[in-house]
Image (cartoon, rainbow, N blue to C red):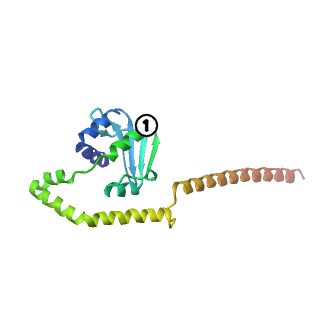
Amino acid sequence: MAIQIAAFNHLLNQHPARRAELAAHVGRRVAIVLPPLEVAGVITDDGWLAACAGEPEARLRLRHGALLSQLSGQPPQLADIALEGDTELATALGRIVGQLHWHAGEDLSRVFGDVAAQRIETLARGLFGFKGQLAFRLAENWVEHLREEAPVLASRHLVGRFVAEVDHLRDDAGRLDKRLARLEAALNKQNSQT
């Protein structure tokens, strides 16, 4: 967990205004989940995230569609974001996280120097410019296709209905087990009396 917190704090370091917004929630425990990654901790006075024990008060759960939207410059769909726990805190956290962007040029300049970092960034933009946008749009359309047209990915409503039906079936099976146990007990009692 320490690596995830360090990476998140590094990203916050590039956005002092977002850190100040986060500092307004000092002492609150939060978590951001983008499977398989999870960052959880307590917000410090300076707007950093620090490791802590205990369950988060608010959890921002993101689906991969939210990441694809962010990378393609589009706002994420509401279906790709789930807020758990304290919704006011989770909403504030989601707004802050949505405004974070990694400035790779800053990190590259520390390692390679300013000139080399500028060249690497220009090369990356050239590689991921139009072709990158096209790839992200194709990926976005593919995810939408899997959700809507070829239901390989189930919608939240269908999964919720399935879970409710499984719960109902489990309860029915439990009641049936209890009835069978009573019948067996009654049958054993009759057999023992004869």
Q: Quadrant of residue 166?
A: bottom right
Q: Picture coordinates of residue 164 (x, y %)?
A: 61, 52
The residue depicted at 59 percent of the width and 56 percent of the height is 162
In this rendered view, identify the residue nearer to me: 159 or 174: 159
List x then y, in percent, for residue 123: 17, 63
Q: Is 186 left or right of 168, judged from the image as shown?
A: right
**What SS does tag 1 mark?**
helix
Rendering coords of residue 134 (x, y %): 31, 66
Residue 110 visible in rendering: yes
Which quadrant of the view contains residue 72? bottom left
- Left or right: 111 with respect to 20? left
Residue at the (55%, 54%) spot, across then down? 157
Q: Is residue 113 visible?
A: no
Q: Amino acid at mark 1?
A: Glu
Q: Residue tagged by mark 1?
A: 88
Q: What is the residue that sits farthest to the right in this orientation?
A: 194
Lateral position of residue 162 relative to residue 59, left or right = right
Residue 71 found in image quarter = bottom left
Label 1 crowd bin: few (<14), some (14–19), many (20+), radius 10 Å = few
Looking at the image, is 185 positioned above or below residue 133?
Answer: above
